Image: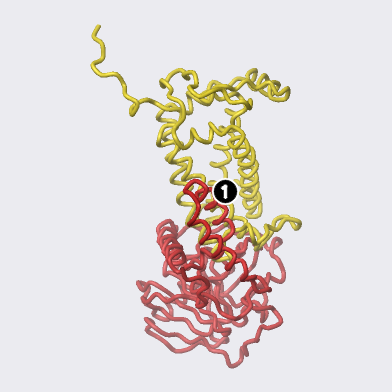
Chain colours: A red, B yellow
Amino acid sequence: MRLNTMPLRTPTPSIFRPRKALDQSMLTENRRLLADIDRRNVLRGAVSLGALTMLTGCDVSENDAVQKALRAVSSWNDGVQHAIFRRNHLAPTFSAAQVVKPPRFNAYYDIEDVKPVDGATWKLELTGLIADKRPWTAQQLSQLPEQELIIRHICVEGWDYIGQWSGVNLKYFLQRIGADLTAKYISFKGADDYTESIDMETALHPQTILATKYAGETIADPFGYPLRLRTATKLGYKNTKWVMAMEVTNQFAETFWSKQGFNWFAGI
Amino acid sequence: MSTPPVKSTARTERRLHPLPVRIMHWINAAAIFIMIGSGWKIYNDEVIFGWLHFPDSIVIGKWAQYGLQWHFFAMWIFVINGLAYLIYGTASGRFRQKLFPLSLREILATVGDALRFRLSHDDLTHYNAVQKILYLGIMLVGVVIVISGLALWKPVQFSELAALFYSFQTIRLVHFLCMAAIVAFLLVHVALALLVPQSLLAMVTGGPVVDGKKPAPAPLPPPEIEATP
């Protein structure tokens, strides 16, 4: 049994992880327990199994075979979420009075560590199945029609808030640049080396935008200035901030969080 | 009138807990175990009550993603097994036979007996009114935890369902309270199963033979303790 395979984790701190490293001594203790159980009779062994799972549930998850099985179920869940996705069903919207200002910050590092993007030199790079791949400046993007969404942001951790986002509708933008709308995925790259991708159905959903404003004002640095994805049908982590590049593709690629075992589809 | 050619054999005799019930019971036990342990891990990332944090040693999944993976794996087992159980219990007449009729008078009488430690219970095959209420109640909690879980998982796709709960955090709270009810039920259920080992054994072997209509007298010696889970 191989325990503790590391490639699942990056050394960077994350809000999803405890600050303190975990005590590895439990692992050794449980190995002894495991060996001990072999010598017990079946009934006692069965009773102990419950206790063993309780003690090692965390470590068992990292076992290669277990992790492979759990990820296979997670992929199956991607398929289920795709199947139940309602293309034109709108997420609930809210009134401007309910908007939380500023929005809640979240990233795989603290807000003090945000490296602001220079909007004057920033360009949105376009790659993949797109007819017109010319990059877009912030000024050019601001000329496009603006859509406003007052929607609930839900984090995988369990918190939520109402946010007011404005920017160009993604479907409109994809049509404008001549993207292949029959492609499967849209991938995003953030300035912080963040990667995310969404399925085409979500990209074409009426409540998916490339946001440039929050609560009527230019998005502040920590929240994705000059451009971030905002979709009403996905968990928070799918909404890439500081978007530097966008690719239209049929190739599935694991993303920042999916590599670490979080669900890829992450629909809500 | 002709007599039946063959009498029923031990193999076809109806037991207190037919094999499907036993299989579904233990599958459910495993699924519930994973759902609660991984649910505690997920809860810890954004606690509802500041004073309540589940210790790392009793949660399932060392990291958030593992807790989520276990939860969204075991949910299928819990839901599919639970649906099979509800269908079986309804179609086979088990629920009607074991859990009904249920009268207010019977409930009050049983509660009174229980409080005076006078619950006569030498028959595993018959549920008293408190047991009936608890089993019906826990099934209802099971249904509500699945519905609130669905609303938590897909508050936009199932926005009509989510709207029944007032707010997203209310859904979390309902889901949490259902978990708490299940944990409370389990404490009593497991404690009584250990106090009356025949009942635990019956969930493994099938227990006493019953004729399917009326509970037969228990072939086991009457238990000393006057309650079963």
Which one is nearer the viewer's eye here, B14 or B177?
Answer: B14
Name the residue at 45% across, 37% down.
Answer: B22
* Left or right placement of residue B111 versus residue A196 in this view: right
* Residue B55 picture location, percent across and down: 68, 59
How many numbered discs, if any? 1
Name the residue at 41% across, 32% down.
Answer: B18
* Residue A94 picture location, percent across and down: 63, 59
Name the residue at 66% across, 54% down.
Answer: B169
* Residue A142 picture location, percent across and down: 57, 82
Q: Quadrant of residue B134?
A: top right
Name the residue at 37% across, 77% down.
Answer: A251
A181 versus B60 height, above or below: below
Question: Circle 1 — which element?
Answer: helix
In which chain is the residue bearing label 1?
A: B
* Residue B209 picture location, percent across and down: 43, 24
* Left or right placement of residue A9 versus residue B4 in this view: right
